[in-house]
Image (tube, grey):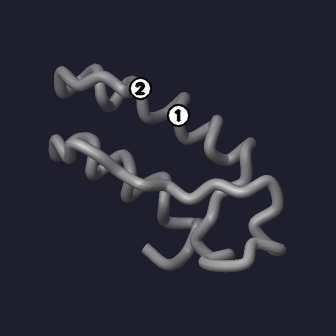
Amino acid sequence: MGHAYGVPDLTRACTAMGVDGLLIEVHPDPSVAKSDASQQLNHAEFAELLKTLNPVANAVGRQII
C-alpha cells in the first residue's frame, strides 16, 4: 500500500475477497520506524482495524486468528 491511511480499507477489501493472509506492519511509533514508516499503523490504529475487520470476515465465512 505504501501509506498507512489506506491499510484499513485495503485490509477489509482483501478479507471480503477471501485472501488467506495479510502482513500488516505495526509499530508503537511509526514515525521512528527504521523502515516503511509511512505504511505502518500504530497499536491503537491496529486495534481499531481488528474491531472493524471481524464483522467483514464473519460476513464471508472467514475467521481472523
Residues under numbered marks 2 and 1 in contact, where contact means CB atoms less than 8 Å apart: yes
Give the x, y percent position of residue 59: 24, 23
Question: What amino acid is labelled 1 in the image?
Answer: Leu
Q: Residues within 10 Å of mark 1 (few under 14, many from 20)?
A: some
Specify the quadrant that holds the C terminus: top left
Specify the quadrant that holds the N terminus: bottom left
Write down the quadrant of residue 18 in the picture: top left
Depth check: give the residue in front, 55 or 35.
35
Residue at which label 2 appears: 54
Residue at which label 1 appears: 50
Query: Going 30% across and 29% down the picture, which residue do you hit?
Result: 57
Query: Going 49% across and 52% down the picture, which residue do you hit?
Result: 8
How far is mark 2 from mark 1, CA to CA?
6 Å
Write down the quadrant of residue 58 in the picture: top left
Question: What amino acid is labelled 2 in the image?
Answer: Asn
Question: Taking 14 as reference, is 32 above or below it?
Answer: below
